[in-house]
Amino acid sequence: MFSTLGQPNWLGAYLAINFFLALGYYLESRKEKPNKGKELNQIIDGMPKYCTLKSKKQFEKGEYDKIINSIEIYYSNKNYRIKSRNDSIKAVVDKNSFVWFRASKTEAGIFRIIADSNNREKAEELLNEAVGVFENAKRAE
């Protein structure tokens, strides 16, 4: 990769690196694809189905910490796994379901509540419960 004068041979280095990248791409493209020969609708039908439901609720900016803390306490008491960040809280119900609370970044004074599950009835149940939890958190002293 170096010329006889001790200077780097940039073209040689470039080609050496690209050889291995090209070889890796070629080998990857030769692997058997699980969806090869299937129609798009067949591929989509084979994917897991999830239902995501959303709600928006108003709140006063000064209530944010109180609301988040109340929500975290409620779902912790139900033994749900809590994922908390600076701007949101997610209660993981099971491997297929969660409910997520976060303040909107585009609408002042709006809380977004999102329920997600692989079962529509469960998503509806989680969203209804979450809206109730949010309303109770707003009223709490």
Image (cartoon, rainbow, N blue to C red):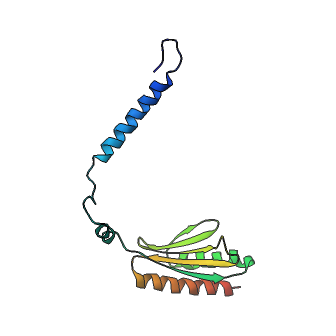
User: Relative to 60, is 27 above or below?
Assistant: above
93 horizontally vs 35: left or right: right
Looking at the image, which residue is at 64% across and 73% down? 104
Query: Image quarter for residue 109?
Result: bottom right
Residue 67 picture quarter: bottom right
Of 123 and 44, nearer the camera is 44
Q: Viewed as shown, does residue 129 lie left or right of 119?
A: right
42 relative position to 93: left or right: left
Task: In the displayed orientation, state which residue is furthest to the right.
Answer: 62
Q: Residue at point 61% right, 83% down? A: 134
Q: Residue at x 55, y 82 (%)?
A: 130
Residue 62: x, y in percent?
Answer: 75, 77
Quarter placement of the N terminus: top left
Percent x, y of residue 9: 49, 21
Residue 64: x and y, percent? Answer: 69, 76
Q: Position of residue 86 (x, y in %)?
A: 64, 65
Question: Is the C terminus in the top left, top right, bottom left or bottom right quadrant?
Answer: bottom right
